[in-house]
Image (tube, grey):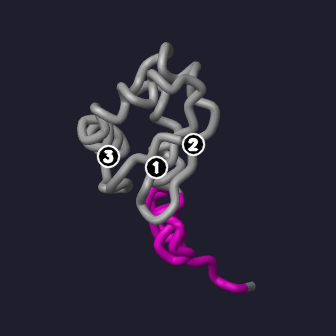
Amino acid sequence: MAKRTTNNQSIRDVIEELINTYRISDKLNQARVIGLWDSVVGKMIARDTTHLYIKHRTLYVKLNSPALREELGFARTKLIKSLNKAAGAEVIEDIAFV
């Protein structure tokens, strides 16, 4: 009978090792930023947001309201900082409101 070996790695360490092995940390951080959008901007703005995606470190946000698009354009820098801080990593460099 083969001798059983033990490996006392925590689940967290195993998951981090898998993330690094498969190089998916960027995609996970991007998903985290998109998931945090509603909590960072609030319900009023989130309900006028129809589509979010990230491409080349730019968050693209589709909005229903031209007035809201204009207002958020003025708050772009603050939103970038808030989203990156909430995600715990520098995920986005810019936001484009479409």
Local packing at callout 2 (Cα closer than 10 Å; few below 14, some 14-19, many 20+) is some
Q: Which residue is mark 1?
A: 59
Residues at marks 2 and 1 touching, judged by CB atoms closer than 8 Å:
yes
The stretch of residues the image draws in magenta is: 2-27
- C-alpha distance separating marks 2 and 1: 7 Å
- Name the residue nearer the viewer: 16 or 87: 87
Where is the N terminus found, in terms of image quarters?
bottom right
Q: Amino acid at mark 1?
A: Leu
Report the mark closest to the observer, 2 or 3: 2
| Secondary structure found at label 1 | strand
Q: Is 93 left, or right, of 69 in this rendering? A: left
Residue 47 in percent (x, y) is at 58, 19
Picture residue at 56% right of the left edge, 77% below the top: 5
User: Which tag, 1 or 3, sits closer to the chain's start?
Assistant: 1
- Name the residue nearer the viewer: 68 or 8: 68
Q: Amino acid at mark 3?
A: Asn
Picture residue at 46% right of the left edge, 63% below the top: 26
- C-alpha distance separating marks 1 and 3: 11 Å
Residue 20 in percent (x, y) is at 47, 72
Q: Which residue is mark 3?
A: 84
Within the magenta stretch, is there residue 18? yes
**Residue 52 numbered tag:** 2
